[in-house]
Amino acid sequence: MPAVRDIETALFSLAPRELAMKWDNVGLLVGECEKEVHHVLIALDVTEAVAEEARQTGAELIAAHHPVMNCHWSPVQSLRNDTLQGHLLRKLVRDGTSVICMHTNLDAAQGGVNDALAQRLGLEQTEIMEGGEGIVRMGLLPEPMPVSQFLELVRKRLRPNGIRYVEKTGTVQRVAVGGGACGEYFEAAVREHCDAFVTADLKYNQFLDAGALGLCLVDAGHFPTEDVVCSVLEQFLTERFPDLKVTKASSHWERIQYYV
Ligand SMILES: [Zn+2]
């Protein structure tokens, strides 16, 4: 069976470390390099529930997208049990669970988060969008469609609990996608003559400005736009290590609800 280190090496062949943003923290973040792995749990985030699922199902390793520690939004200065992150990290170490995170390197990787998102939405002739830092993809829907039909497509394919968006006149065919928080690239999507941009975590002013510029800006949620990558990881590890048991965590799903 592969060791934790072998799985890290394999995942970096899918999503090279050099593709990660400077501020990011990717690779084996918690665990034992030489430990043999029989079961990998795949999850978008390493939540307390996912860590507990790993313990209960005997998974020695969690392969996740979002870094479990020391990203710019969650610096680790202590491992105290009275902080959420400290509690989680202590549990992982106590349970002997290793964690490998593939984040912005997997966003940018060929066949990674955003190619998977483009594929899920049925985009064709997908390419890297200029001005999207190597992360954002754009492609064409097989045929132009009204905004309402496009939103229905997004709803069906990504299964978000709700969608926030700004309307545009005319139809949608050229679509940019940036899973997670890629709102900063909406002007680049306008420059690239996109009709719509599907991303998440958008701000009020981004909606106003995109609407004024004629872009159908769509916030389909962070989880729904990125969770598509879990099947990429699952398939990749299953092919690379046929004897390895690879399962997607069942204890993690979209938490954000919309009350309308
Ligand atoms: Zn994300």
Image: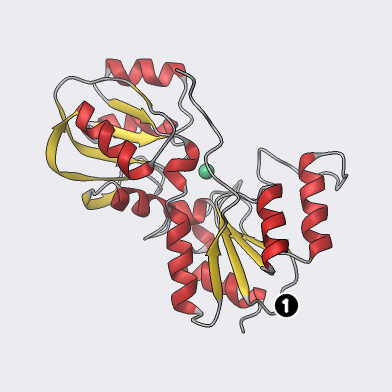
What is the quadrant of the C terminus in the image? Answer: top left
State the residue at coordinates (28%, 15%): 212
Relative to 237, does residue 140 appear above or below in the rendering?
above
Q: Position of residue 172 (x, y in %)?
A: 18, 32
State the residue at coordinates (73%, 64%): 97
Relative to 221, does residue 258 appear above or below in the rendering?
above
Q: Position of residue 205 (x, y in %)?
A: 43, 16
What is the quadrant of the N terminus in the image? Answer: bottom right
Judge from the rendering whether residue 126 lies leftward or rightward of residue 93; answer left or right: left
Q: Nearer the viewer, residue 33 or 92?
A: 92
Q: Nearer the viewer, residue 112 or 142?
A: 142
Q: Position of residue 227 (x, y in %)?
A: 47, 49
Relative to 32, does residue 199 appear above or below in the rendering?
above
Relative to 62, does residue 132 appear above or below in the rendering?
above
Residue that badge 1 annotates: 35
Q: Amino acid at mark 1?
A: Lys
State the residue at coordinates (32%, 44%): 157
Dot 1: element: loop
Judge from the rendering whether residue 119 lies leftward or rightward of residue 61; answer left or right: left
Other-residue count near label 1 (Cα within 10 Å), few / some / many at <14 / 14–19 / ≥20: some
Q: Position of residue 107 (x, y in %)?
A: 45, 51
The image quarter containing residue 41 is: bottom right
Judge from the rendering whether residue 56 lies leftward or rightward of residue 157; answer left or right: right
Q: How many marks?
A: 1
- Let me know if residue 243 appears in the view: yes
- Let me know if residue 29 appears in the view: no
Under 8 Å from ligand 1: the CB of mark 1?
Answer: no
State the residue at coordinates (37%, 60%): 111
Q: Nearer the viewer, residue 170 or 40?
A: 40
